[in-house]
Amino acid sequence: MKTTPLPFRLVTLLLALTLASFGGPKLTKTAITKGMTIGIPAGFVPLPDDGIAAKYPAARRPLAVFTDPSGRIDFSVAQKPTTFNDRDYGLLLKIYKASIQNMYSKVQFLAEDIRTVNKRDFVVLEFVSTVNDTRRGGNLSPIRRYQLVQYAIQTDQLLVFTFNCPADEQAKWQPTAQAVMQSIIMK
């Protein structure tokens, strides 16, 4: 029986480990509610209630918010009642696209469609938003953010999944955002 030389085995092992590390973002399967799990990026932590209240001031608090250690990149899951049903996704796509365009000074859409993920349809809007300082005499730099948003209807609830980061970090975080959205499982 012929044996492979040790240096060759070490190089092969090193190459295999290197290729495995490029296999995609590391996600941790996390239960959001009973019947809903999502892969959360490694290093992201749940934002505590007071952090959610400060960062997402709204009458209806998100179900969950996860943030990176710097607090600049977030993934959130929100839920609100709706009268729409799963046959209205085409209409929802138009409504939410228009709503996003009205919220920001400028929007560059990267994707806008309806996709099936783990046997469930989602409205998908991926974009870079810009908010300009429009105050009289305002001279602040525009705020630009990369966002990937997915909407799904479950019974009488609209679920909104949002990943956002500064636009200058889009190249780094876009693959992670897409992997997170592909990991959503709803029963």
Image (cartoon, rainbow, N blue to C red):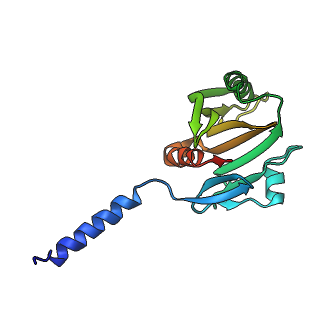
User: Is 64 placed above or below 119 here?
Assistant: below
- Which one is nearer the viewer's eye here, 134 or 100? 100
Task: Using the rendered image of the protein, determine whether residue 144 is visible from the camera's viewpoint.
Answer: no
- Which one is nearer the viewer's eye here, 157 or 12? 157
Indicate the position of residue 175 as horizontal and vertical percent values.
50, 46
Indicate the position of residue 151 as horizontal and vertical percent values.
69, 36
- Which one is nearer the viewer's eye here, 81 or 147? 81
User: Is 87 placed above or below 162 here?
Assistant: above
User: Is 165 placed above or below 29 here?
Assistant: above
Indicate the position of residue 23 as horizontal and vertical percent values.
41, 55
Identify which residue is drawn at 40% across, 60% down: 21
Identify which residue is drawn at 18% across, 71% down: 8
| Residue 120 figure quarter | top right
Quadrant that contains the N terminus: bottom left
Identify which residue is drawn at 28% across, 69% down: 13
Q: Is residue 50 left or right of residue 68?
A: right
